[in-house]
Amino acid sequence: MASEATPRINAHYLEQFTNQTVRIVGKVLALHGETATLDASGSITIHLNRESHLTVNNAAEIIGKVQQDLSVKVLQATDFGSNMDYAAADAVVDATHRYKEIFYEGGGEG
C-alpha cells in the first residue's frame, strides 16, 4: 500500500509545492487564534485545526497542504518542544531536495 509522499520543505520551497501536502519543521513565532506564524528559514502562515496544540517559541512539525497564497493548512501538527537544532532540520530539507531519488519514489517533484 503506497502513501502520499510528504516532501520536507521550508519557506524557500513553498511556491514549488502549491496545492501539495508537505512537512515543515520550524519555530512557532506567534499564535493568533486559528493561525500561527512559523519560522522555517522564512515566515510561514499556518492555518491551524482543532487538534493543533502548539506553543510559542517551541519547534513544531507541520504536515499540511500549501495554499495558493503560500500559507499552509494543517493536517497534523506536532510540538517538538524547545530543544531543536534548526540548522540540522534545514540540512535535512536541503538533502531531500538535492538527493530526491534517495528520499522519494521516482525522484519526486519540486
Image: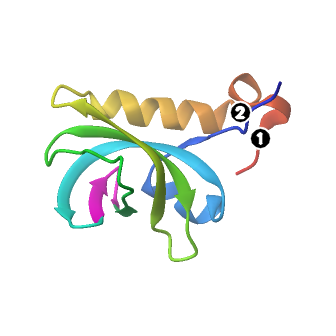
What is the x, y in percent for residue 92? Answer: 48, 29
Q: Is residue 98 above or below residue 31?
A: above
Mark sitting on residue 63: none
Q: Residue at x 29, y 53 (%)?
A: 39
Q: Secondary structure at mark 2?
A: helix
Residue at mark 1 to residue at mark 2: CA–CA distance: 6 Å
What is the x, y in percent for residue 108? Answer: 77, 41
Image quadrant in which you'd find residue 33: bottom left
Image quadrant in which you'd find residue 71: bottom left
- The residue where tag 2 is placed is 100
Proximity of marks 1 and 2: CB atoms separated by less than 8 Å:
yes
Q: Residue at x 83, y 24 (%)?
A: 1
What is the x, y in percent for residue 7? Answer: 61, 41
Viewer-proximal residue among 49 and 89: 49
Image quadrant in which you'd find residue 105: top right
Viewer-proximal residue among 53 and 57: 53
Viewer-proximal residue among 26 and 81: 81
Task: Give the crowd class for mark 2: few <14, some 14-19, many >=20 residues within 10 Å.
Answer: some
On whether residue 80 falls in the magenta region, the answer is no
- The residue where tag 1 is placed is 108
Q: Earlier in the sequence, mark 1 or mark 2?
A: 2
Which span of residues is magenta-colored?
Answer: 35-43
On whether residue 41 falls in the magenta region, the answer is yes
Task: Give the crowd class for mark 1: few <14, some 14-19, many >=20 residues within 10 Å.
Answer: some
Q: Is residue 68 above or below residue 12?
A: below
Q: Secondary structure at mark 1?
A: loop
Mark 2 belongs to which amino acid? Lys
